[in-house]
Image: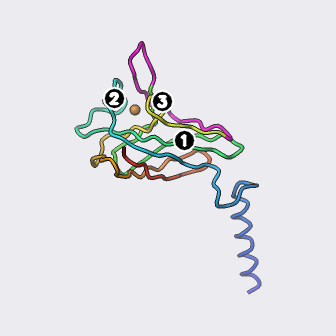
Amino acid sequence: MRMRTAVTILAALGAVLVDAPGLPAQEPRVRLENAWARRAPMMAGDGQAGGKTERGNGAVYVTVVNRGKAADSVVAAATDAADKVELHETYNMSGMMMMRPLPKFDVPAGGKLEMKPGSYHLMLFGLRRDLEPGDTVKVTLTLEKAGALSVDARVR
Ligand SMILES: [Cu+2]
């Protein structure tokens, strides 16, 4: 009985130690906000980046808010709604909007990474279902430090 109490207390201490110091357990250091999705407009770079697919592609935009004291980064993303997800950025080359995959998105300490059209986004290749306005697409982001975080992106 006494042994079991000690183990329980240690387990509780462990849980506290793992959490960010100074923040309540319910407040995660990294939060996902304003997630939305849309079918992707065809753009230059689609072919090279993801290969041609019969089905359509899509894009998901999420704001990643980092309230922690250490920088973090988004290193991967996944969804059941598409065959493949890549981290993309849109850039302007001689007046043409192009896209390219990036290995990660940096999220500054005490700052945020805002994905939006014409900038950073999650590229969904090979949609497994139609993205109708009002639908939700569940997306899971993997962060280097914060781990896996999921969010429902509303289709616009
Ligand atoms: Cu893209």
Q: Residue furthest left?
A: 54
Amino acid at the residue labelled 2? Asp
Q: Nearer the viewer, residue 7 or 121?
A: 121
Residue appearing at x 65%, y 56% in the figure: 27
The quarter in which the N terminus is drawn is bottom right
Q: Residues within 10 Å of mark 1 (few under 14, many from 20)?
A: many
- Range drawn in magenta: 91-110
Front position among marks 3 and 1 = 3
Q: Where residue 57 sits: x, y (%)?
A: 31, 38
Amino acid at the residue labelled 1? Val
- CB under 8 Å between discs 2 and 3: no
Distance of mark 3 from mark 1, alpha carbons?
15 Å
Distance of mark 2 from mark 3, alpha carbons?
15 Å
Overall secondary structure of the magenta section: strand
Q: Residues within 10 Å of mark 3 (few under 14, many from 20)?
A: some
Residue 99 horizontal side relative to residue 133, left or right: right
Q: Residue furthest bottom?
A: 1
- Which residue is label 3 attached to? 119
- Which residue is label 1 attached to? 74
Check disc 1 and report its element: helix, strand or loop.
strand
- Which residue is label 2 attached to? 46
Counting residues from the start of the chain, the first of labels 2 and 3 encountered is 2
Counting residues from the start of the chain, the first of labels 2 and 1 encountered is 2
Residue 93 horizontal side relative to residue 108, left or right: left
Q: Nearer the viewer, residue 103 or 135?
A: 135
Distance of mark 2 from mark 1, alpha carbons?
21 Å
Residue appearing at x 68%, y 41% in the figure: 110
